[in-house]
Image: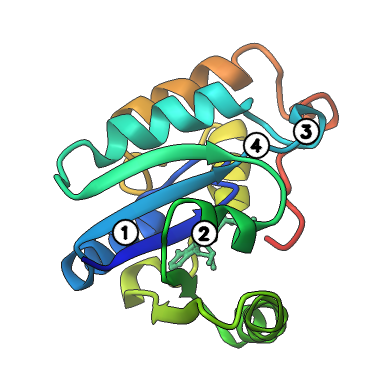
Amino acid sequence: MVRALYPGTFDPIHNGHIDIAARAARLFDELVIGIYDSSPKSLTFDTQTRLALARESLSHIPNVRVEPYQGLTVTYAKDIGATVMVRGLRAISDFEFEFQMALTNKKLAPEVEFISLMTSLKYAYLSSSILKEVAMLGGDVDSLAPAPVIAALRARFAGLGPDGAGSVPIRTSRD
Ligand code: ADP
Protein backbone atom coordinates (compact mmCIF):
# COMPACT_ATOMS: atom_id res chain seq x y z
CA MET A 1 0.00 0.00 0.00
CA VAL A 2 1.55 3.27 -1.09
CA ARG A 3 0.31 6.39 0.66
CA ALA A 4 1.23 9.77 -0.85
CA LEU A 5 0.98 13.25 0.62
CA TYR A 6 0.05 16.30 -1.47
CA PRO A 7 0.79 19.24 0.84
CA GLY A 8 0.02 22.92 0.35
CA THR A 9 -1.68 26.02 1.60
CA PHE A 10 -4.79 25.60 -0.59
CA ASP A 11 -6.02 29.14 0.14
CA PRO A 12 -8.42 28.17 -1.41
CA ILE A 13 -8.36 24.95 -3.42
CA HIS A 14 -8.96 25.45 -7.17
CA ASN A 15 -9.32 23.35 -10.31
CA GLY A 16 -5.54 23.19 -10.89
CA HIS A 17 -5.07 21.60 -7.44
CA ILE A 18 -8.01 19.24 -8.03
CA ASP A 19 -6.55 18.13 -11.36
CA ILE A 20 -3.22 17.26 -9.69
CA ALA A 21 -5.03 15.47 -6.83
CA ALA A 22 -7.18 13.41 -9.23
CA ARG A 23 -4.15 12.37 -11.28
CA ALA A 24 -2.05 11.56 -8.18
CA ALA A 25 -4.93 9.53 -6.72
CA ARG A 26 -4.71 7.26 -9.78
CA LEU A 27 -1.02 6.64 -9.11
CA PHE A 28 -1.17 5.76 -5.42
CA ASP A 29 -3.36 3.64 -3.16
CA GLU A 30 -4.14 6.58 -0.91
CA LEU A 31 -3.59 10.31 -1.29
CA VAL A 32 -3.63 12.60 1.73
CA ILE A 33 -4.13 16.28 0.97
CA GLY A 34 -2.23 18.07 3.74
CA ILE A 35 -3.59 21.54 4.44
CA TYR A 36 -0.89 23.60 6.08
CA ASP A 37 -2.31 25.05 9.30
CA SER A 38 -0.57 28.42 9.20
CA SER A 39 -1.39 31.79 10.71
CA PRO A 40 -4.77 33.03 9.46
CA LYS A 41 -3.33 36.57 9.45
CA SER A 42 -1.46 36.03 6.22
CA LEU A 43 -4.18 34.00 4.48
CA THR A 44 -7.60 34.68 3.04
CA PHE A 45 -9.31 31.68 4.66
CA ASP A 46 -8.70 30.10 8.06
CA THR A 47 -7.67 26.47 8.32
CA GLN A 48 -11.16 25.11 9.02
CA THR A 49 -12.55 26.83 5.92
CA ARG A 50 -9.68 25.71 3.68
CA LEU A 51 -10.16 22.19 5.02
CA ALA A 52 -13.94 22.17 4.50
CA LEU A 53 -13.64 23.55 0.96
CA ALA A 54 -11.00 20.98 0.01
CA ARG A 55 -13.04 18.13 1.53
CA GLU A 56 -16.14 19.19 -0.37
CA SER A 57 -14.21 19.66 -3.62
CA LEU A 58 -12.50 16.27 -3.44
CA SER A 59 -15.32 14.13 -2.03
CA HIS A 60 -15.80 12.48 -5.45
CA ILE A 61 -12.37 10.80 -5.27
CA PRO A 62 -12.66 7.79 -2.95
CA ASN A 63 -8.98 7.28 -2.09
CA VAL A 64 -8.37 10.93 -1.15
CA ARG A 65 -8.63 12.31 2.36
CA VAL A 66 -7.96 15.86 3.50
CA GLU A 67 -6.22 16.62 6.80
CA PRO A 68 -4.67 19.70 8.44
CA TYR A 69 -1.06 19.66 9.63
CA GLN A 70 1.42 21.88 11.40
CA GLY A 71 5.21 22.04 11.44
CA LEU A 72 7.59 20.39 9.02
CA THR A 73 5.91 18.76 6.05
CA VAL A 74 8.34 15.83 6.03
CA THR A 75 7.64 15.14 9.71
CA TYR A 76 3.93 15.02 8.91
CA ALA A 77 4.62 12.74 5.93
CA LYS A 78 6.52 10.32 8.17
CA ASP A 79 3.87 10.53 10.92
CA ILE A 80 1.13 9.40 8.55
CA GLY A 81 3.27 6.79 6.83
CA ALA A 82 3.46 8.58 3.46
CA THR A 83 6.42 7.42 1.39
CA VAL A 84 5.85 9.84 -1.49
CA MET A 85 5.26 13.58 -1.56
CA VAL A 86 3.46 15.06 -4.56
CA ARG A 87 3.61 18.64 -5.80
CA GLY A 88 2.39 20.40 -8.92
CA LEU A 89 4.53 22.30 -11.42
CA ARG A 90 3.04 25.13 -13.46
CA ALA A 91 5.93 27.00 -14.95
CA ILE A 92 9.67 27.37 -14.90
CA SER A 93 9.12 29.83 -12.07
CA ASP A 94 7.71 26.99 -9.93
CA PHE A 95 10.62 24.74 -10.75
CA GLU A 96 13.30 26.61 -8.81
CA PHE A 97 11.23 26.72 -5.63
CA GLU A 98 10.05 23.11 -5.90
CA PHE A 99 13.58 21.90 -6.69
CA GLN A 100 14.98 23.64 -3.61
CA MET A 101 12.15 22.34 -1.40
CA ALA A 102 12.48 18.79 -2.76
CA LEU A 103 16.24 18.71 -2.13
CA THR A 104 15.81 20.17 1.36
CA ASN A 105 13.09 17.68 2.18
CA LYS A 106 15.17 14.83 0.75
CA LYS A 107 18.02 15.84 3.05
CA LEU A 108 15.63 15.86 6.03
CA ALA A 109 13.81 12.65 5.10
CA PRO A 110 15.80 10.46 2.67
CA GLU A 111 13.16 7.73 2.90
CA VAL A 112 10.46 9.95 1.31
CA GLU A 113 10.38 10.34 -2.50
CA PHE A 114 9.33 13.64 -4.11
CA ILE A 115 7.46 13.75 -7.36
CA SER A 116 6.17 16.70 -9.33
CA LEU A 117 3.24 16.38 -11.70
CA MET A 118 3.15 18.80 -14.61
CA THR A 119 0.09 21.04 -14.64
CA SER A 120 -2.53 20.40 -17.29
CA LEU A 121 -2.21 23.08 -19.95
CA LYS A 122 -5.65 24.50 -19.20
CA TYR A 123 -4.63 25.27 -15.60
CA ALA A 124 -1.07 26.41 -16.26
CA TYR A 125 -1.86 30.05 -15.41
CA LEU A 126 -4.06 29.32 -12.40
CA SER A 127 -3.05 30.06 -8.82
CA SER A 128 -5.05 30.73 -5.65
CA SER A 129 -3.85 34.34 -5.76
CA ILE A 130 -5.06 34.90 -9.34
CA LEU A 131 -8.37 33.26 -8.50
CA LYS A 132 -8.83 35.56 -5.49
CA GLU A 133 -7.79 38.68 -7.35
CA VAL A 134 -10.27 38.07 -10.18
CA ALA A 135 -13.03 37.11 -7.71
CA MET A 136 -12.42 40.19 -5.60
CA LEU A 137 -12.67 42.43 -8.65
CA GLY A 138 -15.94 40.81 -9.69
CA GLY A 139 -14.64 38.74 -12.63
CA ASP A 140 -16.09 35.41 -13.71
CA VAL A 141 -14.31 32.60 -11.89
CA ASP A 142 -16.89 29.87 -12.47
CA SER A 143 -14.54 27.73 -14.56
CA LEU A 144 -11.61 28.07 -12.15
CA ALA A 145 -12.90 26.49 -8.95
CA PRO A 146 -15.80 24.34 -7.68
CA ALA A 147 -19.07 26.03 -6.70
CA PRO A 148 -18.52 25.92 -2.89
CA VAL A 149 -15.17 27.71 -3.32
CA ILE A 150 -16.74 30.38 -5.50
CA ALA A 151 -19.51 30.89 -2.95
CA ALA A 152 -16.92 31.22 -0.17
CA LEU A 153 -14.93 33.77 -2.20
CA ARG A 154 -18.06 35.82 -2.87
CA ALA A 155 -18.94 35.80 0.83
CA ARG A 156 -15.40 36.69 1.87
CA PHE A 157 -15.12 39.63 -0.52
CA ALA A 158 -18.72 40.83 -0.28
CA GLY A 159 -18.92 44.54 0.30
CA LEU A 160 -15.16 45.13 0.27
CA GLY A 161 -15.01 47.02 -3.03
CA PRO A 162 -12.02 47.08 -5.42
CA ASP A 163 -9.54 48.02 -2.69
CA GLY A 164 -10.48 45.00 -0.59
CA ALA A 165 -6.95 43.65 -1.02
CA GLY A 166 -5.87 45.99 1.74
CA SER A 167 -8.16 44.37 4.29
CA VAL A 168 -8.01 40.73 3.16
CA PRO A 169 -4.63 39.17 2.35
CA ILE A 170 -4.91 37.50 -1.06
CA ARG A 171 -1.30 36.74 -1.95
CA THR A 172 0.43 33.66 -0.64
CA SER A 173 4.21 33.53 -0.40
CA ARG A 174 4.96 32.43 -3.96
CA ASP A 175 1.93 33.02 -6.13
P1 ADP B 1 2.06 26.25 -1.45
O1 ADP B 1 1.83 27.48 -0.63
O2 ADP B 1 2.59 25.09 -0.68
O3 ADP B 1 2.80 26.46 -2.73
P2 ADP B 1 -0.40 26.05 -2.96
O4 ADP B 1 -1.73 25.81 -2.39
O5 ADP B 1 -0.17 27.35 -3.61
O6 ADP B 1 0.58 25.76 -1.76
O7 ADP B 1 -0.03 24.92 -4.00
C1 ADP B 1 0.08 23.57 -3.62
C2 ADP B 1 0.72 22.81 -4.75
O8 ADP B 1 -0.14 22.83 -5.88
C3 ADP B 1 2.07 23.37 -5.23
O9 ADP B 1 2.91 22.29 -5.58
C4 ADP B 1 1.69 24.15 -6.47
O10 ADP B 1 2.76 24.26 -7.38
C5 ADP B 1 0.57 23.29 -7.02
N1 ADP B 1 -0.31 24.06 -7.89
C6 ADP B 1 -0.91 25.23 -7.64
N2 ADP B 1 -1.63 25.65 -8.71
C7 ADP B 1 -1.47 24.71 -9.66
C8 ADP B 1 -1.93 24.56 -11.02
N3 ADP B 1 -2.68 25.49 -11.61
N4 ADP B 1 -1.56 23.46 -11.72
C9 ADP B 1 -0.77 22.52 -11.12
N5 ADP B 1 -0.27 22.61 -9.86
C10 ADP B 1 -0.63 23.68 -9.14
> What residue type is disc 4 on?
Asp
Q: Is residue 16 above or below residue 115?
A: above
For residue 36, say whether it is visible.
Answer: yes
Cβ atoms under marks 2 and 4 closer than 8 Å: no
Q: Secondary structure at mark 1?
A: helix
Between 108 and 27, the residue placed more toward the observer is: 108
**Whole-number angstrom distance, CA of label 3 to CA of label 4:** 7 Å
* Quadrant position of residue 163: top right
- The residues bearing labels 3 and 2 have C-alpha atoms spaced at a distance of 21 Å
- Chain-order first, disc 3 or disc 1: 1
User: Which of the pair 130/16 is nearer the observer?
Assistant: 16
The residue positioned 26% from the left and 48% from the top of the image is 64
**What is the number of the mark on residue 39?**
3
| Label 3 near ligand 1 (CB < 8 Å) | no
Seen in the image, is 133 located left or right of residue 59? right
Q: Quadrant of the N terminus?
A: bottom left
Residue under the image location 62 percent in, 75 percent down: 109
Q: Which residue is mark 2?
A: 77
Mark 2 lies on a secondary structure that is helix
In percent of width and height, residue 112 lies at 50, 76
N-term-proximal mark, 1 vs 4: 1
Q: Residue at x 31, y 56 (%)?
A: 31
In percent of width and height, residue 59 lies at 21, 36
What residue did someone put label 1 on? 21
